[in-house]
Amino acid sequence: MSDSATTVIIRPEPSRALSAFYVNLGSAVVAGHFRQVGWDVFLWDAARDRPDPAELLQAADIFLLTGYIDDFSKVIELAADIHLHNPEATVVVGGPHVTLLGAKILDITQEFDVICIGDALAETERCLVELGFRRPGSPIMVTASGRDFDTLMPAYDLWDRSRYFGVLPVEFSRGCRHRCPFCTDPVLRPGLLTDQGFTVVDRLTRAADEGYTRARFVDSSLSSLGPPLVEMLRQLADRQLSISWGAFVYPSDVTPRLAQLLADAGCTAVFMGIESLAAEVITGKAHQKRHDKVGEAVRILHEQGIYVHANFIIGLPGETRQTVDETLTGIQACTFDSVGGGPFFLTPNSMFHRDAARFGIEILNERWQETQHLNFWEPAEYFRTKTLSHEEMRSLAGYFRRQCELLNIPWGLSDYPLLCWESLGGERSHLLDLWRADSTSLTKQEGLVVDVLREKRIADPIHDWSHDFLALAGKVAGGCE
């Protein structure tokens, strides 16, 4: 029996254009792990690479797929296509939506051979070796048996820097100190694990040496990590790296001392999860409802030159048109650089799902988890709160966006598209000008770049125009398209 396997990581075609150009940390971590044990690992990007699919699908022993809710239907289709062209291949699936669904996946499809629940890299490797890299007779569920932090360098080279934005994803922690009832983090990663070895500092140092200028921490609550965060930030500041980065922060964590530490360590932009500024809305973040406190956190960050994007969820339990207006009034009292958000979606195994009645949530379709990925963009009415149907939530989310735009607040220009733009050498002020401009005043090239950064769904297939997109974006960023 061979002790190694040819493995292909397949990235499904994304639902939004920007996703086709970002570096995925999970795939890099997986590739780094399997290369370490001697396996050949390759990437096939379904949106960008167009080889003969039959030839590709016959060329490997193992195929690895990651399932998010918005692309889960395509993941299932890819698994079926693999088995059609290569009946002996083993299809492995993991990712957030897979972990949230757990065994319910078997009620949706039988196309996956190995189903990974949680951070189960080592367990998956052992399972595949025990199978002799052969396809099992029936699906196998693999669950993480322990909790450990990756010390291996992710295989960032999996992502060709001429094809993907040069924003390196890194993480210092897994899990979250906050247990917000709408959030799935407590389900995906119970508890909290931090990088006590500070390997992220070494990774960023190496990235800077390789010419990267931008990075983004993907941690769910970086600002809430206390003494370990302080020490990590101090180490980054001491090294004076030529990398600027973004991260998620909570307003309640922001102090002048933390803001100074963030700035000294290279932080230039943050994503602030607020969800609502109305007292009646249930967010799990009562300490963040007062707009004066949130505004003070924004002011402190601005003093350090840090860009602040605020995110809101419209339709959480207790939401009404009046509470949305209350949030809008609070937003006017703050000085956010950008605002974004969307309607509330019930997510599998969140506290709102597990204890729906207590929060005034009525589930209208008991099998909604099995079909949620099919109607993600135009969801069926599978739940409602005491005050709103889901259709009303979507309508109010549209109203909220229109009102924010009338206030001349850039919509959706979060830390990530800003970092993408800056990684091309673009100036922040130039991007803000393009963002605010009427679409009819933009050239075709400018319009495409802005639409991608806005995470719009573009009608033309990505592979038809993506081959030179980074070069085009670089020209637009440099003002010389």
Image (spheres, rainbow, N blue to C red):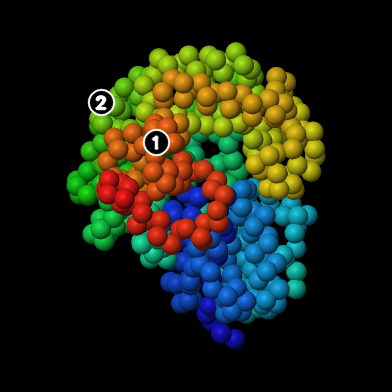
| Residue 210 on image: x %, y % | 26, 61
Q: Earlier in the sequence, mark 2 or mark 1?
A: 2
Q: Residue at x 39, y 39 (%)?
A: 442
Residue assigned mark 2: 303
Classify mark 2: helix, strand or loop: helix
User: Taking 422 as reference, is 28 above or below it?
Assistant: below
Question: Which quadrant of the rendered structure holds the N terminus?
Answer: bottom right
Q: Residue at x 65, y 42 (%)?
A: 377
Instruction: Say what amino acid the circle numbered 2 marks.
Output: Glu
Residue 291 vs residue 342: left or right? left
Which label number is shown at residue 251? none
Label 2, residues with CA under 10 Å away: few <14, some 14-19, many ≥20: few
Q: Residue at x 71, y 73 (%)?
A: 84
Spatial separation of the CA atoms under disc 2 and disc 1: 34 Å
Label 1, residues with CA under 10 Å away: few <14, some 14-19, many ≥20: few
Residue 160 vs residue 92: left or right? left
Confirm whether residue 119 shows in the render.
no
Of residues 70 and 16, the one nearer the viewer is 16
User: Taking 101 as reference, is 3 above or below it?
Assistant: below
